[in-house]
Image (spheres, rainbow, N blue to C red):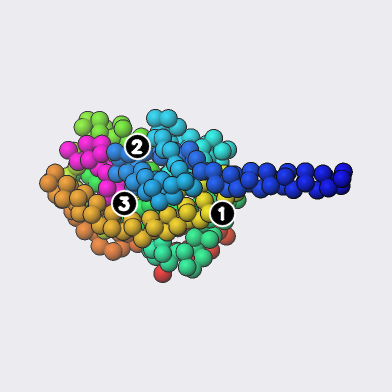
Amino acid sequence: IMKFKTVIAGAVAGAIAGLGSQAAVAAEAKLKAASFLPERASFGAPFYRWTKEVNKQCAGKVSIDVVGPDAVKAFEQPNALKDGVIDMMNGPSAYYKGIAIAVESAVLANIPPTEQRKNGAWALLNKLHNEKMNAQYLTHIGYGVNFFVYTSKPGKDGRFDGMRLRTAPVYDTFFREIGAQTAKMPPPEVYTALERGTVDGYGWPLWGIADFGWHKHTKFRYGPGFFSVVVNILVNQDKWKSMAEDQRGCLNRMALWLVDEFPKWKDAKDKEETALQDAAGVKYVDLGAAHAKRAAEIYWADLEKADPVNVKALRKLLVK
């Protein structure tokens, strides 16, 4: 009888444990996400749009709650993700260059994300994020949205000698190479600097100059565009590993959905932004293919100095 009771007790305990594990699998994974820009900003909006779609398509499996830089400062988000203070991040690799500089190579890619998934580029970028950032690399937003030189007065023959341009680390060396004096300042300060003439222009993508009102003091956009915007979507690796397989699967499917969907968003936004700049009187000046090629070669050289092994490996996979 005692033996029979023991067997029954064990069976009951096993059943309860089984129910518990099923409940754990069924429990929705709630992710705390931070975006480096608010929803109203050009490069914040796509992430918010994507998370809303995730919450709809992965309902019951995954839900994402997003806060902006007012809640977690943009430059603090990479470390917050790495340490598990937040579960997900939407932000550019430039914000964590000091931790994982080789992943910046993605801004120089000229093959689309679909191809990067097939040829091993995505896998290597993911491996580097795993190792350096304690993060799973889902995908990125921005491929094909190029950077330009914007000025309030004309350059000469592709040179900007005597001009002071607001810069960022991604193109600082290039700006100095084409004759500009460079000035670093956060975006909210640029409008006043343009208004007062303390800067004569800036580097920025095609999207978003009206987000800050800069179009009111901009007369020229010099192209062709160089580099590509890369705003990565990352998940803390500990959180990722704690999730059930179907939950990770749903996020992976939604990452692939975004890879396919983003080009449509980009085409519509490109037209909108170009029309806005045209209406503001911003004149496009084409400096020829050598302009963009020079920018790329200069940044490849900078990155290869910092991490030659990984950057050379990525260059083979990211560039035709």
At mark 2, the secondary structure is: loop
- Residue 126, position as x, y percentages in the image: 53, 55
Q: Quadrant of the C terminus?
A: bottom left
Residue indicated by mark 3: 147
Q: Residues within 10 Å of mark 1 (few under 14, many from 20)?
A: few
Point out residue 137 in the picture as x, y percentages from the top left corner.
50, 52
For marks 3 and 1, give the one nearer the viewer: 1
Task: Give the residue at the far front of this rendering.
Answer: 1
**Identity of the residue drawn at 50% across and 40% down:** 30
Of helix, strand and loop, which one carries label 3?
strand
Q: How many marks?
A: 3
Q: Residues within 10 Å of mark 3 (few under 14, many from 20)?
A: many
- Write the start and end of the magenta stretch as one range: 200-216
Residue 9 position in % (x across, y down): 77, 43
Q: Which residue is mark 1?
A: 245
Chain-order first, disc 3 or disc 1: 3
Q: Is residue 119 magenta?
A: no
Q: Nearer the viewer, mark 2 or mark 1?
A: 1
The residue singled out by tag 2 in the image is 38
Alpha-carbon span between mark 2 and mark 3: 20 Å
Q: Give the spatial CA distance, label 3 vs label 1.
A: 38 Å
Question: Residue flagged by tag 1: what amino acid is it?
Answer: Glu
Are the two marked residues, 2 and 3, in contact with CB atoms closer than 8 angstroms? no
Which quadrant would residue 74 be assigned to in this image? top left
Depth order, front residue of 50/137: 50
**Marks 2/1: CA distance?**
31 Å
